[in-house]
Image (spheres, rainbow, N blue to C red):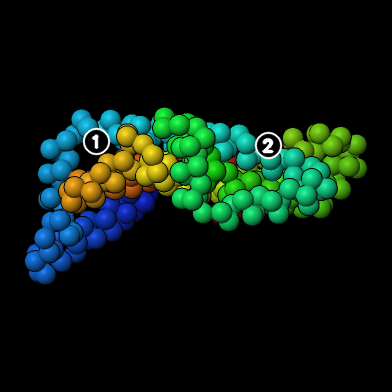
């Protein structure tokens, strides 16, 4: 149990130091709450509208998880296709790079026009932002298997399917989880971008409305919830990796 204290205590200590310095800066420089709220002002915003903020958090969380789930499914399938068929990779991968380079904030209003004002355009935005890192990481993992393992499998008369399932995919899992950890944090960003561009729910909508009404503490409360959500989701994916890949820890350690 004591071995986990540094992993838990150091991040909490770092967060406490940042909050203390932030609070001290607002006092020393006399910064008004509508410019930069102090931590107590943000706490008051939480206590003022706890039910409202929790409902908006739930909305953003559901959009994030739905879009991320689709990105994981689509990204892994795309990576398998690209690595299995080099001709398709040469034809499609440049298009994926070009599509990823398009600013998603420019696409968000079009999604509203095409898909309406519900949760669907937000989920699609999450998918678009999370998809590319998962494809790249999974593709890198699926092509990183040492040649010696492939030669050994062929000497044992392993079929292409057996090599893919029993060698390539297990070898690629650490790289795949890198893509998943990057993708889950970007998924939260995607949900907020979608809510900025046409929504009446979610933490992005709260931030946008708070800015229009100069309720900066409420905006910071929403951003704090977004940060907490990102951290929780990231460590959830990292926890799944820790449970599923004990052998990877042994190799890297």
Where in the figure is residue 225, as x and y percent of width and height? 29, 43
- Asked if residue 214 lies left or right of residue 119, the reply is left
**Which label was assigned to residue 53?**
1
Q: Secondary structure at mark 1?
A: helix
Q: Residue at x 51, y 54 (%)?
A: 103
Residue 129 visible in the displayed image: yes
Q: Residue at x 15, y 43 (%)?
A: 45
Q: Residues within 10 Å of mark 1 (few under 14, many from 20)?
A: many
Q: Which residue is mark 2?
A: 77
Whether tag 2 and tag 1 are in contact, CB under 8 A, the answer is no
Where in the figure is residue 39, as x and y percent of width and height? 16, 53
From the viewer's perspective, is residue 12 above or below residue 125? below
Q: Secondary structure at mark 2?
A: helix
Q: Residue at x 17, y 60 (%)?
A: 35
Residue farthest to the bottom? 29
Q: Nearer the viewer, residue 146 or 80?
A: 80
Q: Nearer the viewer, residue 112 or 217?
A: 112
Q: Residues within 10 Å of mark 2 (few under 14, many from 20)?
A: few
Q: Nearer the viewer, residue 99 or 76?
A: 99
């Amino acid at each position: 149990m004591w071995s986990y204290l540094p992993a838990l205590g150091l991040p909490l200590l770092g967060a406490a130091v940042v909050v203390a310095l932030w609070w001290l800066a607002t006092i020393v420089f006399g910064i008004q709450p509508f410019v930069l709220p102090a931590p107590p002002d943000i706490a008051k915003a939480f206590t003022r509208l706890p039910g409202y903020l929790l409902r908006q958090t739930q909305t953003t969380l559901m959009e994030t998880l739905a879009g991320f789930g689709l990105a994981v499914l689509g990204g892994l399938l795309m990576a398998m296709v690209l690595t299995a068929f080099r001709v398709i990779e040469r034809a499609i991968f440049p298009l994926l790079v070009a599509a990823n380079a398009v600013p998603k904030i420019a696409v968000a209003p079009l999604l509203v026009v095409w898909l309406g004002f519900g949760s669907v355009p937000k989920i699609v935005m999450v998918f678009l932002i999370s998809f590319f890192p998962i494809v790249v990481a999974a593709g890198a993992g699926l092509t990183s298997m040492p040649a010696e393992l492939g030669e050994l499998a062929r000497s044992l008369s392993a079929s292409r399917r057996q090599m893919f399932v029993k060698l390539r995919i297990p070898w690629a899992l650490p790289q795949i989880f890198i893509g998943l950890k990057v993708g889950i944090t970007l998924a939260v960003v995607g949900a907020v971008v979608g809510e900025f561009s046409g929504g009446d729910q979610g933490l992005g909508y709260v931030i946008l409305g708070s800015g229009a009404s100069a309720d900066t503490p409420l905006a910071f409360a929403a951003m704090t919830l977004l940060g907490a959500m990102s951290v929780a989701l990231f460590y959830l994916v990292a926890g799944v990796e820790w449970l599923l890949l004990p052998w990877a820890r042994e190799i890297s350690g």
